[in-house]
Amino acid sequence: MNFRTFIAGLVLLAGCQTPEPRSEPAPEIQVQFEDTTSQKEPPKKTDDCASEVPVIDLDGSLARILPASVLQNPGKFRVQILVSFQTPEGCLSQWIYRADEEYFYPASAIKTVASLEALRLAEELGVGLDEPLRFQDSEPAETSLRKLVEDTQIISSNLAFNRLYEFAGPDRIHQYFWSQGFSSLRLLHRMFSKRTLDEERIVPAIEICRGGPCAFEPLLPRREGKALTVEKSVNTLIGESYLDPLSNELKVEPMDFSVKNAFDLRDHQKLHRTLIFGEFPGLSLASRNFLLETMSRAPESSLTRFKPLTPGLSEARLRYTNKAGRALGFHVENAALSDPRRPLGQCPVLFVSAAIYVNEDGRLNDDQYEYDTISFPFFEALGREVSAYLEHITCT
């Protein structure tokens, strides 16, 4: 699918469909990460690593992973799966089922790109994780980068993500990730937003409080990004009707996802593989470790919600580093499973990325989706099937 042709336009945007979660205290855990930024070699071909990596083959598992209705018509459900096993030396084995066959809405799974770019910009500006920041005309008005990244990655706060989006700015986010080869990325709007595309491009001025006694001073000016939308296609016209987020009127026509965020499944997984085994220029080891540590945590009371493979995984002791998303009938997971006893990046990692669309009545924005009956069971079954490969991530 081509997202490279740009047009300008005004549309109403919808983000996550669920209410903003209340912040829950995350359990304290100890996670160490090895400096692997010196590894710049591309992953080796599986043929060269036959003795080091398992052959990932889930063809015989599809009937157990997908309900019959989904397996018979995978295009309707836009189901995509990518499972990869990679060693620190770069040996790679992959199993691919319909990855990037069509558009899917990334929902909250895209939030990591804003966290990463905000951390890069903070280092460039000399902003500490705990220095107070104040966003003009935004809520919460006063916060810190540490809180924003933790709330975004751990409890998937839409408000925290929106502040990171404003801190980094959409232009800077696009320019950096496109330069790193993530060509599918389109971060066009905040989450749970009712702004037009033109309004989405504007981010407020930001102030910082340094030293003591604390006095706020200008840090970043109000910025306006370039007008970026993408070419309409049959691929991005989804559903049969939708509720307009402003008027709450029913529109009897497909929803146009060409004006919504986009990030292909391969790029989702490439993001995690690069964080763990590669390098993002301008992102320090300390910032990378902090980001990965937050992605390895989740509120104990909401593990299934935030780490949907959990019910199917057979391994009790497991580092589960991920960012999932769920909105507008789309349910997405982007996970890395590893041995928690050794630094992340020092041992093999099993990467599991998947997306599915569940909206039987064809109506969008009505909060009537088959998450409980189709998508959560799908992720549980996927976790159960990939458990056969977890023994290979163990380090001695």
Image: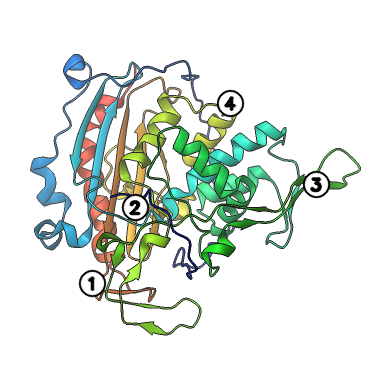
The location of residue 383, given as percent across then percent down, is 26, 44
Structural distance between the alpha carbons of marks 4 and 1 = 45 Å
12 or 162: which is nearer to us? 12
Q: Are marks 3 and 1 in contact (CB under 8 Å)?
A: no
- Which residue in the structure is indicated by mark 4? 284
Task: Single out the mark in the foreground, 4 or 3.
Answer: 3
Q: Which residue type carries mark 2? A: Val
Residue 192 can be seen in this image: yes
Q: Quadrant of residue 302?
A: bottom left
Q: Which residue type carries mark 4? A: Ser
Q: Residues within 10 Å of mark 2 (few under 14, many from 20)?
A: many
Q: Which residue type carries mark 3? A: Pro
Structural distance between the alpha carbons of marks 2 and 1 = 17 Å
Q: Is 223 on the left-hand or right-hand side of 80?
A: right
173 or 63: which is nearer to us? 173
Q: Residues within 10 Å of mark 3 (few under 14, many from 20)?
A: few
Name the residue: 31% across, 35% down: 351
Say the numbered circle drawn on residue 332.
Answer: 2
Q: Secondary structure at mark 2?
A: strand
Q: Is 279 on the left-hand or right-hand side of 218?
A: left
363 or 342: which is nearer to us? 363
Q: Are marks 2 and 3 in contact (CB under 8 Å)?
A: no
Residue 24 can be seen in this image: no
- Which residue in the structure is indicated by mark 1? 360
Colour scheme shown: rainbow
Structural distance between the alpha carbons of marks 2 and 4 = 28 Å
Nearest to N terminus: mark 3 or mark 1: 3
Q: Secondary structure at mark 4?
A: loop
